[in-house]
Amino acid sequence: MAEPADTSRPVRGSRPDGAEPPAKPLPQPSLESAGFWASGADGTLRVKHCHACGRWFHPPLPICVHCRSDDVALDPVSGRATVVAVTVTHQPWLPAFPPPYAVAIVALAEDDAARLTTNVVGCAPEDVRIGMRVRVRFEQHGGIWLPLFEPDPERLDPGPLPEPRDVSAELRRLPKPKRFEDKVALTGVAQSRTGRRLMADPLALTVEACRAAVADAGLELDDIDGLSTYPGISPYAGLTEGGVMAVSEALQIRPTWLNGAGEVPGQSGSIITAMLAVASGLCRHVLCFRTVWESSLTAMQRSGAWETPVARATGTYEWRLPFGASSAAQWIGMHASHYLHRYGVGREALGAIAVTARNGARRNPDAVFRDPLTMDDYLSARMISTPFGLYDCDVPVDGAIAVVVSAIDTVADLPSRPVLVEAVGTKVLERLSWDQDTLTHLPQALGPSAHLWTRTDLTPADVDVALLYDGFTFNALSWLERLGFCGLGEATDFIAGGKTIALDGELPLNPHGGQLSAGRMHGYGFTREAMLQLRGEAGDRQVPDARVAVVTNGGGVPSGAILLRKAT
């Protein structure tokens, strides 16, 4: 067991002048997690342990994640672990965490499947390495003891890294030969005005996109009998227009069916659920919409015009926010660091994705960043959270996109050019977690990718254009490999400095500029671009004779994929 913390040793990031540092965001202990947060009072780390199968797991749950036994208890561990992923944060995300600081995933010595997201302290952040052996060191905040980790002076040899799990046996095949995808089509699409700090009401942007999408489908608002959005009403104000109730009221639509959920297969899960509603006969035409206004919200927060209440961290944030891991740049950056370490590659493939995105945006009049970007620009840009620099990260914007899903038997009567749905991928093959399962790639890219190809006779070789979620460059790289366009760890060679993914390459990637340069429309932008490409309406960025497009959404947990094809 680890010794109690020596409080005379300052934690890196504390104020050298002795002034009281800003308060850290603390977890809100639940009935299940309270024992974990209090366990450091005697200097001992305690983690959930299954007495039936002997395995350890985290975060604490009432039953074992390995064998489902309820014979579990919070038991003491040695407090020793190995760093299996790390990101050094250079962006000042939170006042209590002045950069640089190291956020890491550590695998416990007792069971490398039991991992903690934490801070590595007691050394310079840039000295933290994957494979470094560490030991626990607690930091007390009232009745909460945060488990931090420091280099273990008694174990200088590199520790073992967890190997990826083979989950192929868990993949279910198509249960029936008849597919719901054959009963639906995408008939309308539109995007509102889009830009940085528009200071426009998000509902007004939504209405703008919805009206235009319905008109694009050749329909009237009174034809719409379903509404679907992501994530609906949400505490994260910049990521929602207010949900289906707000849009129903604004447009005076009386839907037969509605959906406004965040726990679906990525942002496009709202489109997939609309397909299911239409295929079941519940609706004929579902209006799907997605609105973001993060750019304006951030400006309002900085000016004091929008007040964000401070509260204890709950949900999945309970396990990340107390360690300064408030951004997806950090969560996904840790996976990217593990990938680069495991496969022994550099940032070149990530840079090629960023430069390719900017080349596409230069052909897209709706893109927010259209200035030229070179590989030298990419490599010399300031770091955000290693290995991500400025151009590895997408761009917050304000805007809305709407898509109409229609019953296939209505298409002949519509003037629009429909896009057909070949297959969807929604399967979960990993734990719905950012740190407890896959480390080599983006979490939740494996399941949807594998599932997609079980629902179609098409293969990756049939895809003409890839619209892959790129909240960060590594997201798109993960999808390329997981979808089977190349093998695991082979993206650097496959991308070939950007030649393969260019507009005239073997697999054009995000010709509109993706979220990296066109702007973070949070998923729906990829569906819009796929529809434009398959309709032949993409202008200067049109992929010649594009007949099949793959779209992925999610950027993490959970995620989804859709395969679309041109109507003949």
Image (spheres, grey):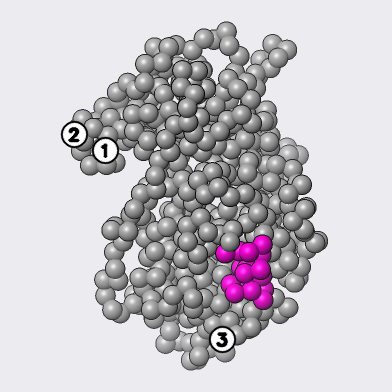
The residue wearing badge 1 is: 64
Residue at the image point whose x is 44% and y is 31% from the top: 159
Q: Is residue 61 above or below residue 511?
A: above
Q: Nearer the viewer, residue 73 or 34?
A: 73
Quote the CA–CA distance across marks 2 and 3: 58 Å
Q: Nearer the viewer, residue 265 or 434?
A: 434
Q: Which quarter of the rendering shows the N terminus? A: top left
The residue wearing badge 3 is: 417
Q: Compare marks 1 and 2 and give the one earlier in the sequence.
A: 2
Instruction: Please give the label number shown on residue 148.
Output: none
Q: Compare marks 2 and 3 and give the one earlier in the sequence.
A: 2
Quote the CA–CA distance across marks 3 and 1: 51 Å
Q: Nearer the viewer, mark 1 or mark 2?
A: 2
Count neighbours of disc 2 (C-alpha within 10 A) and say few if under 14, some if 14 to 19, many if 20 or more: few
**What residue type is disc 3 on?**
Arg
Q: Give coordinates of residue 383: x percent, y percent.
A: 70, 42
Is there CB contact under 8 Å for labels 2 and 3?
no
- Whether residue 388 can be seen here: yes
Q: Compare marks 3 and 1 and give the one earlier in the sequence.
A: 1
**Most distant residue in the top direction:** 8
Q: Give coordinates of residue 461: x percent, y percent.
A: 49, 76
The residue wearing badge 2 is: 52
Q: Give coordinates of residue 560: x percent, y percent.
A: 45, 61
Q: Is residue 188 above or below residue 172?
A: below
Is there CB contact under 8 Å for labels 1 and 2?
yes
Is there CB contact under 8 Å for labels 3 and 1?
no
Asked which quadrant contains residue 508, the reply is bottom right
Magenta-drawn stretch contains 495: yes
What is the span of residues highlighted in magenta in the rendered image? 494-511
Magenta-drawn stretch contains 509: yes
Secondary structure mainly formed by the magenta segment: loop
